[in-house]
Image: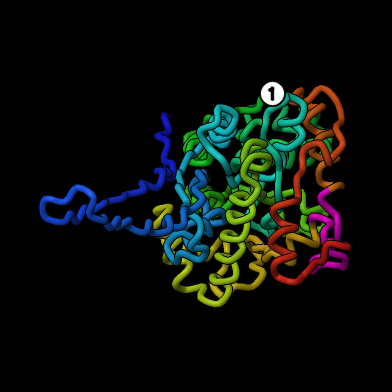
């Protein structure tokens, strides 16, 4: 998929001057009067950022920010790109600035020297993720030698890997099939795979189309939600962070302004997201909820204060057993699993792949943190 580039064009101010000569009739020494036009000040230029996401309600707050013009100083160029690794590639090539995706790519980016940084965790899964087995699979042991649908290099693969090992099946005893979610549903219903990890609304589509299919694990279980393993994040390019920190902070501000607006206007917000990603409003509500609150069976949409706590910028405890600074534990868990899967060669300190400056700016402007913190 090619990505056209849209930038705000900055044109230099043209200074215009006119002079009128009033001469005395036939007198070359007559005084002259010069009239110079006063230049108007340049119009304020907007920052422009290019954002990508794949079709999922949890990322749709960007569309609310754009439609409601919640940060007028910012132009958002939003693209839907279904393969997150395509987005990361475009970020590396300088053709994207920001992407919303699942929150496990940071250690891979550091390991492969990709100029992409995780800047905030945005929501934990609270039931939207499910591991589903076909009806004829009676136990985990029967998956040995079978194909399993996951997004390789994504949280679905880690979720599946942990579940398999807990149930006595090594990750090298199955064949992982790398598919995006639409394709995973088709592969499951068509019998090409014996199991898969699905998030909503795709998990419900599998269950509706395959009577007898078994849900053997969900992210609503305490052991999954308390680790916050399954969730989403926001990534920015090193170029945006280093060269345009003001634009990075404005983008962060726009995202969380959209979350705040949605919490007050969930019905209208869900309609905006549904139209943008071409989901039904019911499917959007299945994921993010319809009242702006934590949605069991879907996700918990973090506001800026909750994100700041999880990222360690604010002290305190969060609901559902989450805590301040939990991003460090999350980073280490995903890094360890990427070594197992061969996606990373070694462990990396979390500070090498996480930049919290844009979020800190937003929290500071909101009065939630001070420079001393």
- Residue placed most toward the observer, 41 or 298: 41
Mark 1, secondary structure of its residue: loop
Residue 47 as seen in the image, left or right of residue 321: left
Where is residue 109? Give x, y as percent: 71, 31
**Residue at (49%, 51%) from the top-left corner?**
205
Quadrant of residue 150 in the image?
A: top right
Q: Is residue 132 visible?
A: no
Quarter of the figure with residue 30: bottom left
Query: Does residue 126 lie above or below 188 as drawn?
Result: below
Residue 224 percent location from the top left of the image: 78, 53
Q: x, y percentage for residue 65? A: 50, 61
In this view, the residue in front, 93 or 10, is: 10
Considering depth in this image, is 331 or 128 the residue closer to the camera? 331
Q: Is 348 included in the stretch rendered in magenta? A: no
Are there few (<14), some (14-19), or many (20+) residues within 10 Å of tag 1?
few
Q: Quadrant of the C terminus?
A: bottom right
Q: Is residue 52 above or below residue 289?
A: above
Quarter holding the N terminus?
top left
Write the start and end of the magenta stretch as one range.
Answer: 311-327
Q: Is residue 323 magenta?
A: yes
Q: Residue at x 65, y 51 (%)?
A: 129
Q: Which residue is mark 1?
A: 145
Rendered image quadrant of residue 308: bottom right
The residue positioned farthest toward the left in the image shown: 25
Instruction: Give how far across and how far down residue 312 sits, in percent.
Output: 84, 56
Q: Is residue 353 above or below residue 1?
A: below
Q: Is residue 80 visible?
A: yes
Residue toward you, 94 or 33? 33
Query: Residue at horizontal 52%, vertical 63%?
Result: 71
Using residue 23 as the reference point, say whether residue 12 is left or right of it: right
Say how many tags the image has.
Answer: 1
The residue located at (82%, 59%) in the rendering is 313
């Amino acid at each position: 998929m090619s990505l056209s580039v849209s930038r705000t064009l900055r044109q230099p101010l043209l200074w215009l001057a006119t002079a009128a000569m009033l001469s005395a009739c036939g007198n070359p020494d007559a005084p002259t009067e010069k009239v110079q036009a006063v230049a108007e000040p340049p119009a304020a230029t907007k920052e422009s950022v290019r954002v990508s996401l794949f079709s999922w309600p949890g990322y749709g707050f960007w569309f609310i920010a754009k439609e409601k013009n919640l940060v007028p100083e910012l132009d958002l160029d939003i693209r839907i790109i279904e393969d997150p690794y395509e987005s990361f590639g475009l970020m590396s090539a300088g053709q994207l600035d920001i992407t919303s995706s699942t929150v496990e790519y940071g250690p891979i980016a550091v390991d492969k020297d990709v100029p992409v940084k995780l800047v905030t965790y945005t929501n934990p899964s609270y039931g939207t993720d499910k591991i589903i087995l076909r009806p004829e699979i009676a136990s985990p042991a029967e998956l040995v030698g079978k194909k399993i649908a996951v997004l390789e290099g994504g949280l679905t693969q880690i979720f599946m890997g942990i579940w398999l090992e807990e149930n006595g099946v090594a990750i090298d005893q199955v064949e992982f099939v790398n598919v995006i979610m639409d394709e995973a549903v088709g592969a499951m219903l068509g019998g090409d795979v014996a199991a898969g990890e699905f998030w909503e609304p795709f998990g419900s589509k599998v269950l509706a189309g395959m009577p007898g299919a078994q849900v053997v694990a969900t992210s609503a279980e305490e052991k999954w939600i308390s680790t916050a393993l399954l969730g989403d994040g926001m990534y920015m390019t090193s170029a945006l962070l280093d060269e345009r920190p003001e634009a990075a902070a404005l983008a962060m501000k726009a995202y969380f302004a959209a979350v705040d607006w949605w919490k007050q206007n969930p019905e209208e917000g869900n309609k905006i997201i549904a139209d943008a990603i071409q989901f039904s409003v019911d499917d959007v509500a299945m994921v993010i909820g319809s009242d702006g609150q934590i949605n069991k069976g879907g996700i918990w949409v973090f506001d800026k204060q909750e994100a700041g706590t999880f990222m360690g910028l604010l002290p305190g405890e969060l609901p559902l057993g989450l805590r301040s600074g939990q991003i460090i534990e999350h980073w280490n868990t995903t890094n360890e699993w990427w070594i197992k899967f061969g996606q990373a060669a070694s462990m990396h300190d979390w500070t090498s792949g996480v930049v919290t400056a844009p979020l800190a700016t937003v929290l500071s402007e909101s009065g939630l943190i001070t420079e001393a913190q």
